[in-house]
Amino acid sequence: MKKILLVMAFCSSVFAQEAFVLKISGRAHLNSGGTWEILKKDMLVAAGDSITTEAGAEVSLRLSDGHSVDIMGDSIFSLRENSEDLKEMDIWLGRIYTKVDKLLPSKKFTVRTPAAVCAVRGTKFTVDVDESKKTDVYVDEGIVGVMDSSGAGEEVFVEKGMMSSVKEGEAASKPLKAKTPPQKVEEKAEKAKKSAAPKSAPVASAQAQASREQGAESGRTAAASGNVAMNGSIGAVSLTRDGETKVYYEFSMYPELTFGKLGIGLELVVHFDENNQILKDEWTKERYPEKIDYIRWGRKHQDPFYFLIGRFRRPVSLGHGFIVNNYSNMARYPNIKKIGLEFDLDRNKWGIEAMTDDVTRADIIGGRFYARPLLETGIPLLRNLKIAASAGTDKDPDSDSETKNDAVTIIGADAELPLLNFKYFNASIYGDIAKMQMSDTYDSFNTSSTTNLVDGGIGKSAGVSGKMFFLNFRGEYRIVEDNFIPGYFDGHYDIDRWTQYSAVSGTNTKAVGMLWGKTKDPVKVGPYIEAWFSFFRIIDFRASYENYNNVRHDDPFYPHLIASASMAQLPFLANYTLEADYDKKGAHTWDDIKKVDENAILALKVGYRVAPNVTMLIVTRRNYDSEGTPTKTTTAETRIRF
C-alpha cells in the first residue's frame, strides 16, 4: 500500500507540472531536444523547450497551478524550469502576456530577458523585448519586481498601470505611468530580428531555423531549413505494371517549398527493379506533372481562403460528412495518381466548400454553400446559426466514357447551431437531409420486381459535435431508407465506385453493388459515432463506427468501422513508433474485425529509431491494385528526416 501511495504521489506530482498549448493561431515552432517541429494545439511543452512564433501568430500556454502565458508573433521564448516550486522562463525577443495566480511564499515565478529579471507574486503583466534587447515591463494587475539581469542596479517594484524599462547592462528605470500600454493583440508589421541571441538562447530566426508546416496537407513529419522542408524514405513498394504486380525498391524524397502562405509539395520517387535498373518511363516529360504532390494556399480552417491541388494527404469532408465523408483520392495510390482540388472560402456571412477527385477528368465533384443569415442580428446563439445546401456527384463511376447516363448524384441540406463555447468544452447541434438520384442507365437493372434498383432514397440525421478537453467527438442518430447510402463518397469510394468481377458478370458500380434489390423499405435506424484526439505528441487517434438495427447479420457493408492511430515517443518505448490504418465493412463481431478479408483495407507500420532522424519500419499493407484485385504485402522501409 505504501508503494502504491508513493507511485500515486509521484504521478500526481509529474502531471501537476505540465505545460501545454491551450490555443494557437498562425504558425509557431517547437524545439524539443534539438528537433524543430510545427507547434500544434494540445502539445506538451517541457522544461528546456523553446518556442518561436511567426508574424501574426499567437500561442497560449497553460502551466500547472493555473498560470498562463500568451506568446505573441515574432517572438522567441524558452521554458527554463517548470517544477512545483519554481516557474522560470526566458523571452529573448518579442512579447509575452502573463497571468500568474497567487503564489505561496515558498513558490517562485520568474521571467528573464537578455536585459532584465522579473519576479512575480501573482499578477497580470506584459514583457516586451526589442532587437536591442531593451525590455519594457507593463503591469495590469498586482506588483512585479524588476531589475537588470547583470545585477548592476536595485530592484524596482512596478504596480498596476505602471511600467519600467531596462537596457542591457543598466539599472531598471523608476516606474512610470504607462501612457500607451500594449494591447493583447499582435502587431501586423514584421520585425527585423537582426540581433543574435546568446549561446544559451534559441536561434534568432523562427523562419530560418524552425520546421515549417509538416506538409500540412501531406501528413508527413518534416524538418526544415529556411523555406524548404524535406522528408524521405528508402524501402520497397508493390506496384502493378502492365497487369503484373511486383515489388520494387523505392527511394523517395518529399520536399515542400514555402513562400508565405504558398506551399509546393514535390514527390521525387525513383523505383528500381530486381536488376537494380531505374524505371525510366516514370521520368519522361509527359509524367513530370505527377511529381508535384500538391500546391496549397493557406491552411484549412485557419485562413478564410484555402485551396489545395494535388493528392489529398488528409481526407476531405464537406459539412458533417453526410454526402462526402473523409474522401481520399489516394485509395489506389501509387498505382493510380490523381490531381484533386480542394477549395474553402469563408466570408463570415457566407462560405463555400468544394472538391473534385481529379482536375484532369473531374468525375467526382462535391460542393457546399452555407450562410449565417442571423449573424448581424446580435441575437444570442441564433446569430451563429448556419444553413447550407450540398451536392456530390460521380458522373462516370465505371471510368468508361462510352457508358452513358450512369452518374450517381446526391443532393442535401443541413443546419448547424453552436450551443456551448467554453475553454475546455464546446458543442453544436446539427441536422442533415439528403436524397440519392441515379441516371437513366440504371433503369436497365430493373429486370424484375424482386431484383431492381429503385431511385430516390432519402436519408436523415440529427447529431451533436464538439470538443471536450483534447477529445473531439461527433454522434448522430440516422433514419435511412434502405436504398440510400449515407457518406456515399468515403475513403473506400475510389475502390468501390467500380469493381470488375469477371468477364461473365461484368462490372458493377458502388450504387449497384450496395442497392441491388433494395427498395425504400425497410427504413434503417442507427448511430454514427466518430471521435478523434491528439494527446500531446504521444498518441494521435481517430475512429468511426456506423451500424443499423435491422440489417442482415451477413450484411457485407454494415457495421462499418474505421480506425487510425499513430503512437510515438512513449516513455517506456522511446525508440519505437507505431502507425496503423484500418477500414472494415461487415464488422459484426470481434472475429469479423480481426479478419483481414475482402472487406478490409489495412496499413500497419512498426518502426524502430536506429539513429537520430533515421527509423527502420516493417510495413504491412492490404489494399487493391489498379484492377481492383486485393493485394497484401509486407516490406521493409527506412524513413529519413533530412
Image (cartoon, rainbow, N blue to C red):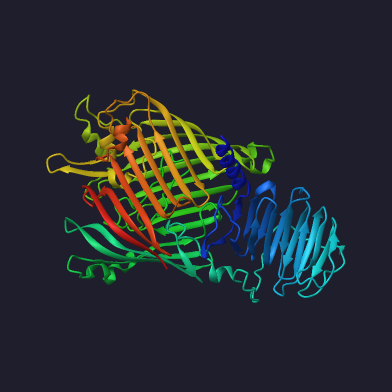
Q: Is 113 located above or below residue 470 in the figure?
A: below
Left or right, residue 158 beside residue 621: right
Residue 585 lies, in percent from the top left, at: 31, 36
Q: In which quarter of the image is the N terminus?
A: top right
Q: Residue at x 40, y 53 (%)?
A: 577
Residue 447 lies, in percent from the top left, at: 19, 30
Residue 165 lies, in percent from the top left, at: 81, 68
Q: Is 406 located above or below residue 98 in the figure?
A: above
Left or right, residue 522 beside residue 10: left
Q: In which quarter of the image is the C terminus?
A: bottom left
Q: Is 378 located above or below residue 275 in the figure?
A: above
Residue 13, visible in the rendered structure: yes
Residue 607 lies, in percent from the top left, at: 36, 55
Residue 469 sits in which quadrant?
A: top right
Left or right, residue 462 beside residue 56: left
Question: Which of 50 and 467 lies nearest the eye of the viewer?
Answer: 50
Residue lying furthest front: 2
Left or right, residue 183 beside residue 482: right
Question: Which of 338 and 198 lies nearest the eye of the viewer?
Answer: 198
Q: Residue at x 58, y 55 (%)?
A: 45
Residue 202 sits in which quadrant?
A: bottom right
Residue lying furthest left: 504
Residue 559 sits in which quadrant?
A: top left
Question: Which of 537 and 522 lies nearest the eye of the viewer?
Answer: 537
Residue 178, visible in the rendered structure: no
